[in-house]
Amino acid sequence: MSEARRVNPGRIFMGKVSHGGDLQGEITDICAREMIHLGRVEAIGAVTRACLGIYHQQDREYRRIIINEPLEIVSFSGNISMKEGQPFVHAHVLFSDNKGTTYGGHLVPGTVVFACEFVIESFEGPELSREYDEETGLHLWNMKEGS
Ligand code: ZN
């Protein structure tokens, strides 16, 4: 059965990631610095290198796709929750190359920013933390804790 929780709007941040910065690392650092434990994030911009993970459901492992060329961030959509006591950004990103061809997947460290503008919306509510899930092999939200 689906499970849901009520959360309330909190603080909203707008900013940019530094040129040459790691996309996931810098967004995560902002969450840690501003004590954002629950929320969502969106961003647009460009990168010089993209690193994506594609989860192979049968093998239960992420395989990496690395694209070493200038790309636009067409869409970056993610959420913020807790994993092992630290804010964790789970984001999926769609990139496009100079022909408009798109590549998408789960963002992993190693994506290098050319320019990137983001909006982070924090939520007030009980902590949501990730735990290993036997059924999928992923670290999913534990909806029973913290409510
Ligand atoms: Zn994912």
Image: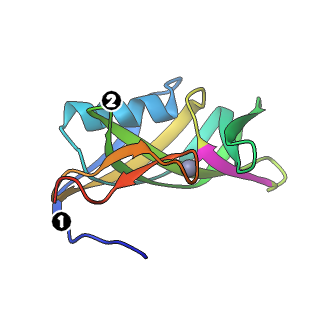
Image quarter hosting the C terminus: bottom left
Query: Which residue, as the protein is rendered here, is positioned at the far bottom?
Result: 1
Q: Are marks 2 and 1 in contact (CB under 8 Å)?
A: no
Q: Amino acid at mark 1?
A: Pro
Tell me the residue at 52%/37% (across/down): 115
Tell me the residue at 69%/52% (across/down): 104
The residues tagged by marks 2 and 1 sit, at their Cα atoms, a distance apart of 21 Å
Q: Position of residue 117 (x, y in %)?
A: 43, 46
User: Which residue is more in the foreground, 125 or 28?
Assistant: 125
Query: Element type at marker 1?
Result: strand
Q: Position of residue 87 (x, y in %)?
A: 30, 37
**Extent of the magenta region:** 102-106
Image position of 7 with respect to 85: above or below: below
Tell me the residue at 55%/29% (across/down): 109
Q: Amino acid at mark 2?
A: Asp
121 horizontally vs 47: left or right: left
Classify 10 Å Cα crowding around label 1: few (below 14), some (14-19), many (20 and above).
few
Q: How many marks?
A: 2
Q: Label 1, on which residue? A: 9
54 horizontally vs 106: left or right: right
Image quarter hosting the N terminus: bottom left
41 horizontally vs 30: left or right: right
Image position of 94 with respect to 9: above or below: above
Q: Label 2, on which residue? A: 29
Q: Quadrant of residue 11?
A: bottom left
Classify 10 Å Cα crowding around label 2: few (below 14), some (14-19), many (20 and above).
some
